[in-house]
Amino acid sequence: KFLHNPFAVTGLAVLLLFILAALLAKWIAPYDPTRIDMMFPNLPAGTDNHLLGTDELGRDIFSRLLYSSRISLSVGFAVAFVSVVIGTLIGAVSGYFGGWVDTIAMRLVDVMNSIPSLFLNILILAVFGSKMSYMIMVLAFTSWMGVARLVRGNYLQLREMQYVEAARAT
């Protein structure tokens, strides 16, 4: 079904291209991304073998973009993984047990949804420093609620299926 959806296949191809470019940045990047060359600041795109030009310090923008994609992709995948794990655990416990456990878990989800994630991220990074691990933790901590609701809904739906009722009856 996935392969018959052209948008999904195109999205996968673009994602794989970005991941491949990030992994091969050491060999693809024409210049050192941290090398400052004050002789060529603010070059426009395509000038002197600089595909995307240079910044105000003469650093090649294309090289910096390739190397920075490693950080962006690692943060994105880490946040997604942690969010799915937390959301799945809370949603599964909530949907499986139901009752007061479900009520408490869903009120926790409501409280977490009311916290502005951008403000919390800025606050945590200002107080504790700008480490990437803090940013990943804050983003994951504020983005698991949708997964929890989805998993809870699936558990509630499965609990009401006829084969579950037949298993309880036997």
Image (cartoon, rainbow, N blue to C red):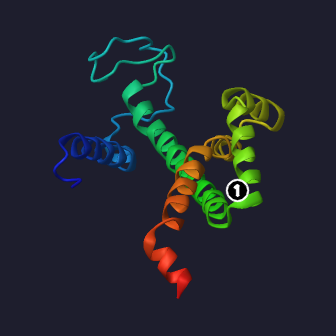
Residue 146 lies in what quarter of the image?
Answer: top right
Please determine whether, in this image, residue 6 is positioned above or below residue 150: above
Q: Which residue is mark 1?
A: 102
Q: Can I make out residue 136 in this image? A: yes
Please determine whether, in this image, residue 13 is positioned above or below residue 34: below
Task: Please state the horizontal and vertical placement of residue 68, each as a whole percent of the image.
Answer: 48, 36
In the image, is 101 to the left or to the right of 31?
right
Residue at 62 percent of width and 66 percent of height: 96
Q: Residue furthest bottom?
A: 170
Residue at 65 percent of width and 43 percent of height: 132
Please determine whether, in this image, residue 20 is positioned above or below residue 41: below
Quarter of the picture holding the N terminus:
bottom left
Q: Dot 1: few (<14), some (14–19), or many (≥20) neighbours within 10 Å?
A: some
Q: Residue furthest right?
A: 127
Closest to the observer: 153 or 32?
Answer: 153
Residue at 61 percent of width and 42 percent of height: 143
Q: Residue furthest front?
A: 169
